[in-house]
Image (spheres, rainbow, N blue to C red):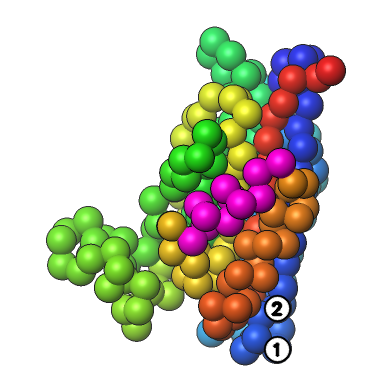
Amino acid sequence: MSAGLRVETGHATSVGRVRTKQEDRYLDSGRMIAVADGMGGLARGDFAARTMIDALAERRMPNRTAQVRTELKRAINRAGHKIARSSHRGAECGTTVVGAVLGQGTASPSWLIFHVGDSRMYSYENGDLECLTRDHSLVQELIDAGIISREQARYDPRRSIVTRAIGTSVSAEPSFRHVEATPRILIACSDGISDELTHEEISDIMRRYEGETLTDTAQALVDAALESGGRDNATVVLARAVQRK
């Protein structure tokens, strides 16, 4: 990572208004952020999410993003094997994950975005919100095929079915994306945020909290998800790379 950059972060989490167990886990360690969402409806989702976050936290990430990609795959594989072994003892569980690592890209500092499942990464910059990940989910495949609209997907009863996850029988292959380390704000969140808040609502909150701390902004997103229903655990981690003064 460029010596001229530092990373500002903030996070917030809540069990929600319906669930009694917190199955989200997060990592907020400066140049690496992540959110893992234990699979709803499966036993010990909290164990699966914690295992994934611990596997990431234990890795010593290199500076070059090309090498970071290898380390992320190793962390995901290690977590998947540990979760699967636990499942074989009679307690099935799994998790999604989304995150980013700041490092040196081919020409300039960049974020390496990674995800498995339907936890999302957004980018907010100059008033514009962009979703940087494409859900590994059944409803996303239905959207891509033109069978349902994005608005219909928010209420579709199949929206919890993921096509990739860690520690289960489906693929755990991560998707990657590079984005330049501009002053953009990265927003890593569980579906307790993205299912409750529309793209426009997230964008509106980000605009209203420009100039505030990332911790306050993260809390505002979680509070809004709770006000919208809070039907799931809600977790968000924000990060921004800025020039050192």
Q: Is residue 123 left or right of residue 45?
A: left
Find residue 63 and report its image quarter: top right
Q: Position of residue 7 (x, y in %)?
A: 76, 32
Task: Answer above or below: position of 225 versus 175.
Answer: below
Q: Relative to 87, is 149 above or below?
A: above
Q: What residue is shown at x 37% (from left), y 64% (from top)?
A: 137
Query: Mark 2 and mark 1 in contact (Cβ < 8 Å)?
Result: yes
Number of residue marks: 2
Q: Secondary structure at mark 2?
A: loop
The part of the chain drawn in magenta is 201-211
The residue labelled by disc 2 is 15
Q: Amino acid at mark 2?
A: Val
Which residue is situated farthest in the right direction here? Answer: 245
- Crowding at dot 1, Cα within 10 Å, few <14 / some 14-19 / many 20+, comes out as few
- Spatial CA distance of label 1 from label 2 is 7 Å
Q: At 43% from the left edge and 57% from the top edge, which residue is drawn?
A: 199
Please give the residue where the numbered disc 1 appears in the rendered image: 20
| Residue ID at (49%, 67%) | 197
| Closer to the camera in the image, 14 or 43 | 14
Q: Quadrant of residue 132?
A: top left
Expressed as whole percent of the image width and height from the top left, the position of residue 234 reads 63, 70
Query: Is residue 104 visible in this depiction of the protein?
Result: yes
Is 209 included in the stretch rendered in magenta?
Answer: yes
Mark found first going from the N terminus, 1 or 2: 2
Specify whether residue 106 is painted magenta.
no
The image quadrant of residue 239 is top right
